[in-house]
Amino acid sequence: MKRGWFIILLLSLGLNVGLGLNVFRRPSSPPKPLPKDAPRSEQGFAGREDARAFVRHRLDRLTQELDLTQDQQDQLLAIHLDAGDKIRKGRMAKVEAREKLHEAYTAEEPNICQIHMIQREMSAIQTEMDSTIVDIMFKERDILTAEQRQKYRAMFPGERKAPGSGRRDGHGRHSRSPRRSE
């Protein structure tokens, strides 16, 4: 269980570091701003149809890999559709906060306190989204049989395989270097 939280923490950290680097990087020429009435999908949001396509793709993959029943598929679809609006709103809030951060940073005289406040707001939004994703994962897990849960866990990156099944070099030996006792 600790591994799952660690993976989520790393994903969140990676997203926030990428966000921070993006904010402070100066492009050689400023991007042409989109009109305020441009569809959200053009502004970096997945529209409702894009989100439904993503959910459908995820459910198809889970169905194929876990051999889900129709009832399980229906339950998973309900979970994803229920959480979809919450995640979409979180993404929109993050983009708006990013815009505020950019405006604060590029102001004539940037206010470091305001920038830190906006960054904390962005972190809170990301934390809420991460929490929602964890809730989705546990709800998905609760629908699965014991055998399906094993397969589900194996779908996550970094999941441990059976003992002795780690990476091997070209000669059949494990690629991890032996620990030295000094």
Image: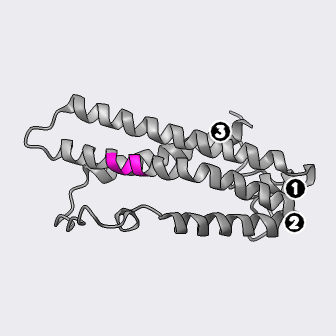
Q: Is residue 9 left or right of residue 21?
A: right
Main secondary-structure element of the magenta-colored stretch? helix
Decide: is 148 above or below 4: below
Residue type, numbered disc 2? Asp
Looking at the picture, tell me which residue is in the foreground, 149 or 143. 143
Residue 16: image tag: none
Q: The residue tagged with tag 2: helix, strand or loop? A: loop
Give the magenta range. Answer: 92-96
Q: Is residue 17 visible?
A: yes
Considering only order in the chain, which callout, 1 or 3, is on the residue closer to the N terminus? 3
Q: Is residue 68 visible?
A: no
Q: Dot 1 surroundings within 10 Å: few (below 14), some, or many (20 or more)? A: some
In the rendered image, residue 59, in percent from the top left (x then y), is placed at 72, 64
Residue type, numbered disc 3? Trp
In the rendered image, residue 70, in percent from the top left (x then y), is placed at 85, 64
Label 1 sits on residue: 148
Q: Is residue 152 left or right of residue 122?
A: right
Query: Can you say which quadrant of the picture contains the N terminus?
Result: top right
Label 3 sits on residue: 5
